[in-house]
């Protein structure tokens, strides 16, 4: 597949930000703005950057793309599950493999479809284009689901995926090697060693002493420590917390014979499905192939017994040992209980995480919304990590806390597009420039701890060098309590936390298609818009901040505005001062059923 670079080629397509895989001696077209980073501006600054047209066009591209990847996923999953059962000489049911494979497979289908679509579009826009791919000896195979996510955020692994797709499409391109550093995946504890050690001792005692059919195990429950202690006291010996320390899977040497048994998967999806079928045997994480026996053994050592029920907010994604324990326990009759752990559940029309959790759980506890036609019984309950305490508006407080977000430069899951993120950054700048100078000094920017090479803070401080920037060393709860007004420019958990404590908030969103609202969310957001809490443009949001900052108490406490906020809280942010009693009653019912 190697070929010499042809300097007379009409168009060279740069697919990533790796400059050594560019050819600037000819007309160069960049697949997207994720290639043009501030850090490598010396390489492209003298050019007039030409971007290819996005393949995501039309008013319903998000619906079409989401429908395609979910249909492909649902067709591929049973075919892959059948092969893995045969490979490992096991007979796990479809739900087991959905729990184990689902988080990785949903993301893998998303990123592969995105890159496939870009290359097919480039072939139409620039017939005969060339590029430089990654040599096969530089390819890597993820160790586990988390490792896939870590790799998928980086340029080299995306170049690997682009290269594989181009080979499938029959393109002959020059290749170059590149060392892709493997991350240390041995152990990623969430907490100090000593506290983790004590938790493991407690788990050992739990496994040894409890009668499994009468116990409910909590892992990553998101209950506060105080709430958890109260629940344990109310149900002694019945409810057991488990450590949420993430034991990562070990790396294994690839077994070509085993992976060959995964070739030729047949499932619906046309040319894209054939592309996936070609690529997947080499890309499926090691923990599901070479490391599967070790994964099972490690899970049995960590989780000894099958409980009555297993409750978790987010261990369903990256904790492979937990997933195996939960899936095998479910096969034997244990109930799987999920709960919401972020502020976008129920709000968005298209959300892979929500679909996955509602497909694997027996019961799912939302923050107020409901949903029919899914496997789980969706039951509204108070958010486990929000106590119902009210902060409210306070003119004696100072500062405007501005919560920002970030997106990886490459697709992790559709319909969230990195190509939309530059517009988000433009809207940030428009908001900052629309504020009066007297309020610029009141702004306290809280960016995400990751930047992914976008240079978000640098872009904003170029305009206003004195901009105060807050790190995550300060807890969000403390920062929120100390500000007079919270401004949020995206949908995430932080806006929900502000609503939960009734903190004055101004909300403005970007890219209406990547954040297309669900039918049950639209009336609530319309009410927030009419109440002057949510805005469509950054200029409108800045004008509102300027108008209300001096007296947020009067503005926020206006009855009509509070009615709109309460409408939202009732549907999407259920909290209660009786949180312990309500959850205790729910768990008692589970244990007694």
Image (cartoon, rainbow, N blue to C red):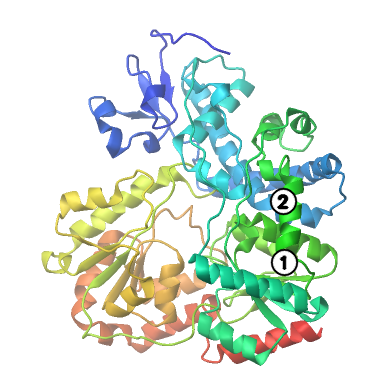
- Category of crowding for the residue at label 2, using alpha-carbon neighbours closer than 10 angstroms: few (below 14), some (14–19), many (at least 20): some
Q: Which mark is residue 361?
A: 1
Picture quarter with the N terminus = top right
- Earlier in the chain: of badge 2 and badge 1, it is 2
Q: Percent from the top left, x then y, of residue 120?
A: 55, 27
Q: Percent from the top left, x then y, of residue 211?
A: 81, 79
Mark 2 and mark 1: Cα distance apart in space: 22 Å
Q: Residue at x 84, y 45 (%)?
A: 85
Q: Residue at x 19, y 52 (%)?
A: 461
Q: Percent from the top left, x then y, of residue 551?
A: 21, 83
Q: Which mark is residue 295?
A: 2
Residue 525 vs residue 276, the one in the foreground: 276
- Category of crowding for the residue at label 1, using alpha-carbon neighbours closer than 10 angstroms: few (below 14), some (14–19), many (at least 20): many
Image check: 509 left or right of 463?
right
Residue 190 vs residue 99, the one in the foreground: 190
Q: Residue at x 48, y 53 (%)?
A: 513
Q: Residue furthest left?
A: 438
Q: Percent from the top left, x then y, of residue 298?
A: 71, 55
Indicate whether 271 appears above or below 107. Answer: above
Image check: 461 left or right of 387?
left
Answer yes or no: is residue 521 visible: no
Indicate whether 109 appears above or below 546. Answer: above
The part of the image, by quadrant, that contains residue 274 is top right
Indicate whether 115 appears above or below 413. Answer: above
Answer yes or no: is residue 405 visible: yes
Q: Are marks 2 and 1 in contact (CB under 8 Å)?
A: no
Q: Residue at x 50, y 47 (%)?
A: 59
Residue 96 vs residue 410, the one in the foreground: 96
Residue 92 vs residue 416, the one in the foreground: 92
Picture quarter with the C terminus = bottom right
Label 1, secondary structure: give it. Answer: loop
């Amino acid at each position: 597949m190697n070929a010499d670079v042809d300097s007379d080629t009409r168009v060279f397509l740069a697919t990533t930000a790796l400059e050594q895989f560019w050819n600037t001696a000819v007309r160069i077209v960049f697949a997207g703005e994720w290639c043009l980073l501030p850090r490598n501006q010396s390489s492209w600054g003298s050019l007039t950057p030409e971007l290819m047209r996005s393949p995501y066009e039309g008013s319903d591209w998000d619906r079409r793309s989401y429908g395609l990847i979910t249909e492909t996923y649902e067709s591929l999953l049973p075919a892959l599950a059948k092969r893995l059962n045969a490979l490992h000489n096991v007979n796990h049911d479809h739900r087991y493999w959905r729990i184990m494979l689902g988080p990785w497979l949903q993301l893998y289908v998303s990123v592969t479809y995105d890159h496939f679509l870009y290359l097919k579009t480039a072939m139409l826009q620039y017939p005969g284009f060339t590029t430089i791919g990654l040599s096969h000896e530089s390819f890597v195979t993820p160790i586990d689901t988390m490792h896939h996510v870590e790799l998928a955020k980086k340029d080299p692994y995306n170049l690997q995926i682009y290269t594989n797709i181009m080979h499938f499409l029959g393109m002959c391109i020059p290749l170059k090697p590149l060392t892709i550093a493997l991350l240390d995946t041995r152990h990623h504890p969430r907490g100090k060693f000593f506290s983790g050690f004590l938790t493991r001792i407690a788990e050992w005692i739990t496994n040894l002493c409890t009668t499994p059919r009468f116990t409910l195990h909590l892992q990553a429950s998101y209950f506060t420590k105080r709430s958890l202690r109260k629940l344990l006291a109310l149900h002694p010996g019945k409810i057991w917390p488990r450590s949420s320390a993430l034991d990562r899977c070990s790396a294994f040497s690839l077994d070509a014979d085993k992976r060959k048994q995964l070739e030729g998967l047949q499932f619906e999806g046309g040319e894209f499905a054939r592309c996936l079928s070609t690529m997947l045997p080499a890309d499926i994480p090691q923990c599901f192939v070479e490391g599967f026996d070790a994964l099972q053994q490690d899970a049995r050592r960590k989780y000894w017994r099958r409980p009555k029920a297993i409750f978790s907010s987010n261990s369903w994604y990256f904790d492979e040992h937990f997933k195996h324990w939960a899936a095998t326990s479910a096969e034997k009759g244990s109930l799987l209980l999920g709960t919401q752990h972020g502020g976008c559940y129920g709000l968005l029309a298209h959300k892979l995480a929500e679909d996955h959790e509602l497909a694997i759980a027996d019961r799912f506890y939302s923050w107020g919304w409901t949903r029919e036609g899914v496997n789980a019984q969706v039951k509204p309950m108070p958010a486990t990590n929000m106590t119902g305490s009210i902060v409210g508006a306070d003119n004696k407080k100072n500062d405007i806390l501005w919560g920002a977000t970030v997106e990886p430069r490459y697709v992790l899951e559709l319909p969230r597009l990195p190509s939309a993120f530059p517009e988000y950054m433009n809207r940030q700048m428009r908001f900052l420039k629309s504020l009066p100078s007297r309020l610029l000094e009141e702004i306290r920017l809280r960016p995400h701890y990751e930047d992914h090479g976008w240079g978000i803070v640098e872009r904003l401080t170029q305009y206003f060098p004195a901009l105060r920037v807050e790190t995550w060393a300060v807890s969000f709860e403390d920062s929120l309590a100390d500000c007079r007004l919270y401004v949020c420019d995206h949908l995430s958990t932080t806006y929900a936390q502000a609503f939960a404590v009734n903190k004055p908030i101004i909300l403005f969103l970007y890219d209406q298609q990547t954040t297309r609202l669900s039918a049950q969310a639209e009336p609530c957001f319309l009410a927030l818009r009419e109440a002057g809490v949510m805005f469509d443009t950054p200029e409108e949001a800045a004008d509102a901040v300027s108008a209300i900052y001096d007296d947020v108490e009067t503005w926020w406490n206006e009855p009509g505005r509070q009615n709109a906020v309460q409408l939202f809280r009732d549907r999407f942010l259920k909290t209660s001062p009786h949180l312990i009693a309500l959850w205790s009653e729910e768990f008692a019912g589970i244990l007694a059923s």
